[in-house]
Amino acid sequence: MDVQAIFEILKYTLPALIVLAASYLIVQKFLVSELRRKQIALLHETQNITIRMRLQAFERLSLLMERVHPRQMMPRVYNSAMTVSLLQQVLVTTIRTEYEHNLSQQVYVSREVWESVKTAIEQEIGMIHQIAQRLNPDAPAKELNHFISDYLMSQSDDLPSEIALKIIHDEARRVLSYGAI
């Protein structure tokens, strides 16, 4: 083969290779940018769904803390025909049932929020047991009701459920302000 033939072949193939390489690079860049755009859109959509779910979890945990607060719970479960031990049992069962009903919410909130909820539940149950132990188990439930009311009135610090509520509200505010954290 002579040099003239090689130059003739190169004259046609070299521009074709350059056009092929340029086309490949342009298509590659387009596909990568399109993929990134779709990933960002999916992330944004997912984040919106996640934020909604997290806010619902904050709502449910706030409701839980309100429902297990002794001031809110006592009127719901108190019955004058009960004894101290029965009222104690009903109060503890009510708290545990409310807590178990909301266990799945821990997936959507921070560890700090969930730990504050768990701690509040444990401390509310402990407070009920501690007050009930001072009383005769067969005494009328009115006595336990009275002692719990006195205890709540004598507390200058926030109750565990109130502290947990503050932590829940602070994190919900952060999520609303800054998006997912």
Image (tube, rainbow, N blue to C red):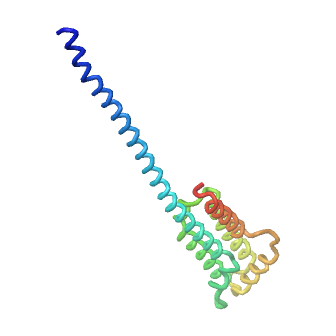
Residue 60, compared with residue 85, is above or below; it is above
Q: Determine the residue positioned at 55% across, 63% down.
A: 54
Outermost residue, left direction? 1
The residue drawn where x is 32% and y is 27% is 18
Judging depth in this view, the residue of 175 and 89 nearest the camera is: 175
Q: What residue is drawn where x is 33% and y is 35%?
A: 23
Residue furthest top as drawn = 2
The image shows residue 165 at horizontal and vertical percentages of: 68, 68
Q: Is residue 94 above or below residue 157?
A: below
Q: Nearer the viewer, residue 10 or 128?
A: 10
In this rendering, the count of numbered labels is: 0
Q: Position of residue 74 (x, y in %)?
A: 67, 82
Q: Is residue 72 left or right of residue 54?
A: right
69 and 22: which is toward the camera: 22
Question: Where, by quadrant of the figure, is residue 67 drawn?
Answer: bottom right
In this view, the residue farthest toward the bottom is 81
Above or below 108: residue 24: above
Quarter of the image for residue 108 reads bottom right
Residue 42: percent from the left, percent from the top? 45, 54
> Is 26 displayed left or right of 172 in the figure?
left
Instruction: Name the image quarter holding the C terminus.
Output: bottom right
The N terminus is located in which quarter? top left
Residue drawn 74% across and 84% down?
143
Q: Give the image quarter of residue 69.
A: bottom right
- Image x and y of residue 93, in percent: 58, 75
